[in-house]
Structure formats: C-alpha cells, structure tokens
Image (tube, grey):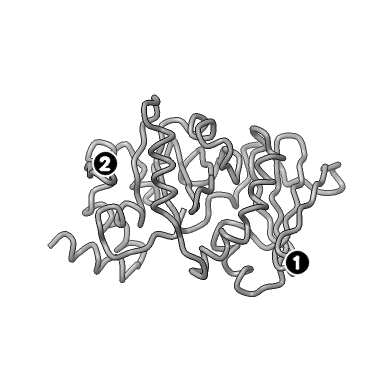
Amino acid sequence: MEHGGNGTDFPLGVTRPTEQSGSMTAETRVDEGRLNTTLRMHRDVADFVVTTTDPVCQERIVHMGWHRSGVDTFSRVLSASGDVRRIHRTFATHLEEMVLQSARLRPIRWQDALATFTERTEGTSLTWWLYGSGAMAVRGLDIVPGDLDLAVSDPNLVADLLADLLVEPVTHHDRWVAEWTGRAFGGALIEWAARPRDHPEALEQSAVVAAQLETVVWRGKEIRLVPLAVQLGVATRRGLDERVRLLQRALG
C-alpha cells in the first residue's frame, strides 16, 4: 500500500528468524550489487532480506515496507505460505524495477497491471474494489499511481489467480490494519488486503465503504471504486495536500 507499512509486523505467534535459529538461506543477486536479496526461512516465516548501498534504493525500500536491520540491510518478514522460493525468485527478478518505479525513475505501467488483474479475476467468485491513487487514476484524475491497492474478499484466491506474478506470499498480520495482504507485479506493483480491522487507516477497505462503492467503466470493464468523498476525507487526514486539491476539484 502507499504507506508501505504492511509487512513490518510479524505473523501471529512467530518470532524473527535468525541464522542461530537454523534458518535456511538462498541468495539471489540483482543488478551487479546495487540491489541483492536473500530469502531466509524458518518454520512458517520467510524473511525477504534486501541489501543495497544506494541511498535512493535504501529510502524507497523502507517506503515499500522493509525496516533497516543493518547498515545496508533491510528486512521484511512474511508468512512462508505457498511456493516461497519461487515467489522469492520472482521478487528478485522484479526488485530493481519495483524500487525504481517507487522512486519514479521508471514508468509505472499501472494500466497494464490493472488490465491483467481484471482479466484474471473476471468470472471468478472474487469480490474486490480499487482504492487509493489507482481509483483516482481510473476516474481520469491527473495522478500517476505508484501501485494498485485492492480490497479483496479472498486473498488466497487472488494469489492463485496471479501465481506466476507473485512477489510476496499471502501473509497474515496481527498488528496491521488488515489481517491479510499479498503482492504481485505485472507492470506495476499490485497489492491486496482482506479482512480490514476497525482502524481509520482501513476506511477505504471497510465494510462501511463496501456499501457505498461506485462503478466506472474502464477499457470495457466495470471497476468498483471507493467514493471520492471518502478518499477526500482519507487524504485530508493523511495530509496529502496535492491529492486533496485533485479530489476537491473532481467533487466540484
């Protein structure tokens, strides 16, 4: 998600894996050392470790949900669900692109990502809607989303439908605003959340908003979106001044 905080907490009842606790390690290097990543697994925990000396990459990897665990090392602890080693290989393949997109140094192909998501979920039992800056962009507002944020009814079904694109396993959180999250990459980062908690930061994912969703047609597909008035309230609370101005103009 845009605040990048959904992976800094640990899955319920699991402690951080360490080399001393018998973790199994597999390493993949990306871009000749500017970014490299290590998968550390222990029981039902997977730690996607990223190492970089590049200041821009360091700043963006923290924004994306990693926390600093060493001078040049950053950690993101996830559930070891699904084929974690294959997911980590996909993560390693797209790591540089994701980080540079986050830094706005590469084009963010959010339209391709949304088209992929709609095509793969069409005709399934999945219920979902788009929120965040992606919902604004679909309406035609002058904003380029850094990623796509989706509220979904079944996080594991999404993982099955996007299995070849997964860059993180579906993960349970006991201290974040939603119980379940996952990530895939299909031209841009696709992030989904399920079972939001009663928390102000979960408003756009909540059951209250689910009863107010609006539908627009985008590339021939019906996309359900969070109402602009709800997004304005969220943007105002978060101090996103430019987004507030865009939403106010759109609401007239």
- Report whether 36 appears left or right of 8: right
Mark 2 secondary-structure assignment: loop
**Residue drawn at x 26%, y 61% as measured from the top left:** 141
Q: Position of residue 84 (x, y in %)?
A: 68, 38
Looking at the image, which residue is at 70% across and 58% down?
50
Residue identified by numbered label 1: 33
- In the rendered structure, which amino acid carries the disc numbered 1? Gly
Q: Quadrant of the C terminus?
A: bottom left
Name the amino acid, label 2. Gly
Q: Which circle marks residue 150 in the picture?
A: none
Task: Residue 68: give x, y in percent of width and height.
Answer: 67, 63
Q: Residues within 10 Å of mark 2 (few under 14, many from 20)?
A: few
Q: Which mark is residue 220?
A: 2
Q: What residue is at 28 percent from the left and 55 percent from the top?
A: 231
Q: CA distance from mark 2 to mark 1?
A: 43 Å
Viewer-side residue, 221 vs 47: 221
Q: Visible in this render: residue 197?
A: yes
Q: Position of residue 198 (x, y in %)?
A: 39, 42
Q: Based on the displayed image, in which of its 4 quarters is residue 54 positioned? A: bottom right
Report the front residue among 93 and 158. 93
Question: What residue is drawn where x is 21% and y is 54%?
Answer: 229
Pick whichever of labels 2 and 1 is earlier in the sequence. 1
Residue 193 lies, with reference to residue 98, above or below; the image says above
